[in-house]
Amino acid sequence: MSTEFARTWQHAVVTGGAGFVGSHLCTALLDAGTEVTCVDDFSTGRRANVAALLDRPGFRLLQADVAEPFAVDRPPDLVLHFASPASPADYLRLPMHTLETGSLGTRHALELAHHAGARFVLASTSEVYGDPQQHPQSERYWGNVNPVGPRSVYDEAKRFAEALVTAQAGTYGTDVGIVRLFNTYGPRMRGHDGRAVPTFIRQALAGEPLTVTGDGRQTRSLCYVDDTVRGVLAAAAHGMRGPVNIGNPDEITMLDLARLVITLTGSDADVRYIERPVDDPAVRCPDITLARDKLQWEPRVAAADGLRRTIDWFRAHSADPAPSPGAPTAAHRR
Ligand code: NAD
């Protein structure tokens, strides 16, 4: 077990545990000897992500929409609130669900933690910085978000969730933490979820042109999922309120990322330029001084290495059905 996970938990509830990041968190916690209840409505996650965990002792799967009240069968000492559509394709398809998950879902997850006396950690996002006017972004920056733009359903849901978590701690004394995750990538991303890494890999492996938006000079900072999981568990164990940025400061332009994926896949695919989405941030890079100082955390996996592992996974799972959102819930139909 890594020293960053030094504090051991008896029972963790992971909302959104059947999603990309959540399923890696469930695995890491089980590996560390923690019992895990994964709560997920499969709106953007997949049963396949946790299929290998179903037979492991201490793992439970509860299908539930956290925007509705929910209960688990025994009190947790840690709640990791990761439920939320995260890719633009998903949250634009599920705008009301995204807002309700960030607001009502966060409220319900906080109540669960409060009544159990558990520590609570919110998965927030670099999107709270919007299209940033400070670069790189430190936790002290308040952001530049368009509250009525198409991305606002996600950005504002997370900003509201941060406010709710902060108010909960001030009002009821709940032990809370906020991690602001920057772009994370790795195995179990969906090839059609619209995010750059899975899109480029899927296209390169199929020999299709890689669709770069705009002129491709916009940047992102990509963190391999194992590093993100270590950072989240370090913040949980530390007990800090945060917010704390968890991301990789190794910034790359989208065009360079496309070229790197082409090289690493050995593809002869080309690049095709397409229209850039509205309010797409021009730059994105975390200042991780706080995580380095307080958590002794920093990313370890270089982009080429992480991308190679992700490409290997995509090669091995090429037969997976593409977009497989779960059955719509009442919230989706609204
Ligand atoms: P994902 O879509 O793969 O996972 C989200 C999971 O939440 C899915 O399994 C989905 O079914 C579940 N979910 C959504 N709404 C729910 C609800 N109302 N009730 C129960 N389950 C629900 O996305 P991800 O990339 O794994 O992101 C996980 C979390 O991390 C999200 O909160 C996201 O905002 C945050 N985050 C991710 C990134 C990233 O780059 N992956 C960056 C910043 C923040």
Image: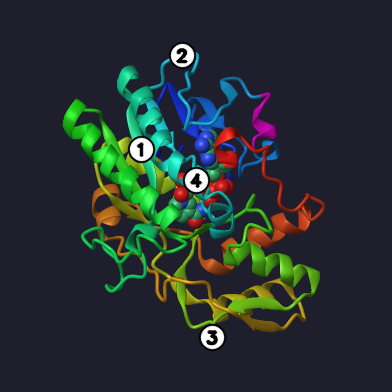
Q: Which residue is mark 3?
A: 215
Q: Secondary structure at mark 1?
A: strand
Name, please, the residue furthest toward the right: 319
Q: Secondary structure at mark 2?
A: loop
Q: First in sequence, mark 3 or 2: give its number.
A: 2
Marker disc for residue 121: 1
Mark nearer the viewer, 3 or 1 = 3
Crowding near pointer 2: few (<14 within 10 Å), some, many (20+)? Answer: few
Crowding near pointer 3: few (<14 within 10 Å), some, many (20+)? Answer: few
| Span shown in magenta | 50-55
Count of all numbered marks drawn on residues in the image: 4
Q: For residue 52: magenta? A: yes
Q: Is residue 267 left or right of residue 109?
A: right
Q: Secondary structure at mark 3?
A: loop
Q: For residue 15: magenta? A: no
Q: Which residue is mark 4?
A: 96
Crowding near pointer 4: few (<14 within 10 Å), some, many (20+)? Answer: some
Measure the C-alpha gap from mark 2 to mark 4. 30 Å
Mark nearer the viewer, 3 or 2 = 3
Relative depth, front residue between 55 and 334: 334
Measure the C-alpha gap from mark 4 to mark 1. 23 Å
Residue 16 in view in this figure? no
- The residue located at (56%, 81%) in the rendering is 255
Residue 260 on image: x %, y %:
61, 76
Marker disc for residue 74: 2
